[in-house]
Amino acid sequence: MSGAFRIGNAGRLTPARTARFTFDGKAYTGVEGDTLASALLANGVHLVGRSFKYHRPRGFLSAGAEEPNALVEIARDSARKTPNVRATVQELYDGLSAKSQNRWPSLSFDVGAVNDVASPFFSAGFYYKTFMWPKSAWKNIYEPNIRSAAGLGVAPDQPDPDHYSSRFAHCDVLVVGGGAAGLAAALAAAETGVRVIVADEQAEFGGALRFESGAGIEGQDGWAWAQGVVAKLKGMGNVRVLPRTTAFGYYAQNFVALVERVSEHLADPGHDVPRERLWQVRAKRIVLATGAIERHMVFADNDRPGVMLASAARTYLNHYGVAVGRNVGVYTANDSAYAAAIDLKKAGVNIAAIVDLRDNPSGALIDLARAAGIEIHDGRAVTRVGGKLRVSSMVVQPKNGGGERTIAIDALLMSAGWTPSVHLFSQSRGKVAFNEDKRFVPGTYAQDCVSVGACNGTDGLAASVDEAYAAGAKAAKETGGKAAKANKPKVDADEVWSRGMLGSAPGAGPDATVKAFVDFQNDVTAKDIRQAVREGMRSIEHVKRFTTNGMATDQGKTSNMHGLAIAADMLSKPIPEVGLTTFRAPYTPVTFGAIISHARGPLFDPTRCTPMHGWAEKHGAVFEDVGQWKRAWYFPRAGEDMHAAVDRECVAVRKTAGLFDASTLGKIEVVGPDAAKFMELLYTNPWEKLEVGRCRYGIMLREDGFIYDDGVVGRLAADRFHVTTTTGGAARVMNHMEDYLQTEFPQLNVWLTSISEQWAVIAVQGPKSRDIIAPLVEGIDMSDEAMPHMSVREGKICGVPTRLFRMSFTGDRGFEVNVPADYGQAVWEALWAEGQKHDAAAYGTEAMHVLRAEKGYIIVGQDTDGTVTPNDAGLDWAVGKKKTDFVGIRGLTRPDLVAKGRKQLVGLRTKDPKIVLEEGAQVVDNPNQPIPMKMIGHVTSSYWSENCGRSIALALVAGERDRMGETLYVPMPDKVIEVEVTGMVFFDEKGERLNG
């Protein structure tokens, strides 16, 4: 048997196809096609969890994605554990293992339930008012206990062994939602030949047709019609049908993110099947057919297991063949609950009574209920329910007061009406409108989308299908679809429901003891909303944050409108004046695995390799990660450690020459008639008068006057500059330039192109550098007279085009050979062969750092920290004195930036030349002062220099450069190191080696 509450001849599942599963270690049997929720209900299990704050017993509220209570852990093995899975969405498979959460030691006996007794101490906003005293208790008592209590599930502690995939897709029409409206829209669009994608979060399309027993379309019952349409769409080459796929985010330019549950329903998915797939879809037109969500009634103890939405009970019966009880009560302010009662009655379930808050309700469904012999109590309210771990009774009372009556029940169905699901519309930046039916519906559209059906506030199946079919046809026509014969589905039988109510019902307070829940997951009650208003909250956004209403993983799908109505009532304002909370992505929780996909482990970040990477590997390079780049760190020979290799490389560069792979430098071409004007505005230096064929070191500032990036810029033509940036700054400098070009200087006729990947760069540095390059160069005079320091020439090297820069980051004669990336390794190998004739060495980034520090050349981001000006870095000479405007010029004049005593870059020499300072170490002027000491600076760069025969360091030190010659101190855990403040140049102070 698949459960005592499984009803024969009800539902659409095949009873013979069973699936075994466990819940909290107990074995059960379900049916293939069940959700975990329907399978548990079939076995009579209603208690599935405990609430977050009060640890109250909780059961199923819904049958879909809006479920706030039934969050469980699903585990395939010790590594495949997923917390907070909605049991109403999780499909059953053979061997499924589920466990309840947020309870100890067991679900039926949870010691955390003491919080329910102590609830007066945990009222709304308590976390803003408590844990303040004593101060010392925060670290040792409050914080550890709060952290241990936080969250509902337990995060997995092992690496996820599954894999995930992602797809990008474009279509003409994207239809979100696979109910009657969504299918009608998709069908209308598809018949015109345009590319269509239709997605729905459920395993099977049909939406509300899963439970609407009274729906008929095209001579069939609604569900059968839906399956026929899906089959037709799947057979069309221009349509992609995506079940089990939730559209969770609607972004700019009609970009929608969807997550498909590919294998979560399979007992043995296999290693070649992804667990989930992320779809990133760009659509020309989007049809939103996301339906509506039923609201619960707000009354005392409405959270008892067995109390659920009427549509949920109807779904479990009509789709899964499961009765939620044997003696069921109904509490409603809406006609749709009558349909649930009638369906259950027909299936043989006793309906104890229907309690209708409305006076004298009328209509076809009410007449059918009476004809079925169901007792109806109109103008009355359920003020509370009995039972603890399962509802056992309901107390009925006239809504304006009077005598009470207790009615025995084992389940209670409730319906306060339906809320249009405008989440995705709101995410698209559309503006909702509050209509005369007291519903927020789509108002002003911001993107190329249209809402249809229940999410648009359209009542009734016939009206929804008509509206959706027309919208699908219109969307297709606007994207180039051909005219198709109109085959609009004909609705034969319909269900139309009245509006319902908002806010709390009788029995929900306002006394301080009744718990009438508005937000089930966060334990927010009607009295909490009222308290928030009493304590001064006037905006619904403030009420939301004070109470946490709508802030749980369900994002208030069932609670937002009730909370808003209660607040509005307290404020004596219309609901629109109180406002509506913002709907944010994701619509339902999305796993990190789906978002990250393959980007984890070695693929966490793209690995970028230079064209010469293979050569460096073969020659034993040790690599370091610099941003996304793999850069050769040093080239050890046999028996060498890092220090020995770096010392050898540094000496070789100074003595003969060295080859360095500088391809990772950012490279940007600035081209156009106004290129020089643009450079004048983006850099501190003057550029208008820079001759073609010459280079200049440039500094880029932020608006606040602090150094943002630097690099050498070569002028290739009157209208063309080759700009280099730091390796890590390439992307942000490009963005920085584009930002200013598009927003501040749009009048300039300039084009920016990133060419970082297009050019391989080989730095040849040292006294013999020209001798190495010259034999391979064609068409360039490399004499000092024809090609002085800081110049650039275009020609050929090894028969391929080159941009040859004469520049140096070592202080020796140097060149940077730029060649097309495809030829990078070939040119490197030719230069290496020539270099061997002169005892040249390949050197890595560590030697590069040492060599530049010997000359006092800074590295932005290492010797600067975002608060360093050109003057602080000793680069005043790079700021054009006659310039009247550039980005950051006003920032440089701020009083704090020109005040005396700023931290500025200086050199440091340790009194003991063999001691190498630690980078980041703090500098003080008095080592004997009490702790905490006053720090006056820190070490930014520190190395052993074999060429200097001692350690060298750069530091940012307060007191400007007036401290030259002073002795300062670097306190370390084991000793205090004495240092002398010096200039920043430690080698070849006169700069004579630039010319060999």
Image (cartoon, rainbow, N blue to C red):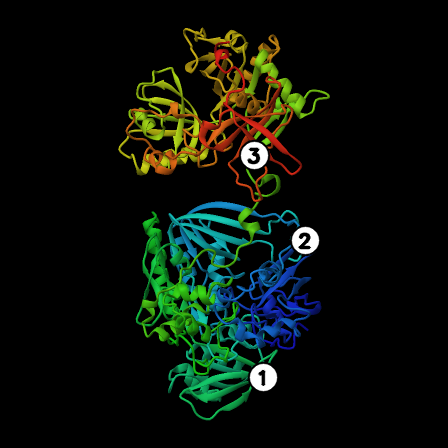
Q: Earlier in the sequence, mark 3 or mark 1?
A: 1
Whether residue 808 sits left or right of residue 836 in the image: it is left
Residue, disc 1: 392
Label 3: element kind: loop
- Residue position marked by numbered label 3 in the rendering: 607
- Whole-number angstrom distance, CA of label 2 to CA of label 1: 40 Å
Q: Quadrant of residue 630?
A: top right
- Do labels 2 and 3 touch, CB within 8 Å? no
In this orientation, which residue lies closer to the viewer: 870 or 157? 870
Amino acid found under the numbered disc labelled 2: Ala
Which amino acid is tagged 3?
A: Thr
Q: Where is residue 455 in the image (x, y as percent from the top left)?
A: 39, 64
Name the residue beneath numbered marker 2.
Answer: 79
Q: Is residue 755 visible in the rendered structure shown here?
A: no
Nearer-the-camera pick, 262 or 516: 516
Q: Is mark 1 on a helix, strand or loop?
A: loop
Three-letter code, disc 1? Ser
Q: Mark 3 and mark 1 in contact? Answer it, CB < 8 Å.
A: no
Q: Which mark is residue 71?
A: none
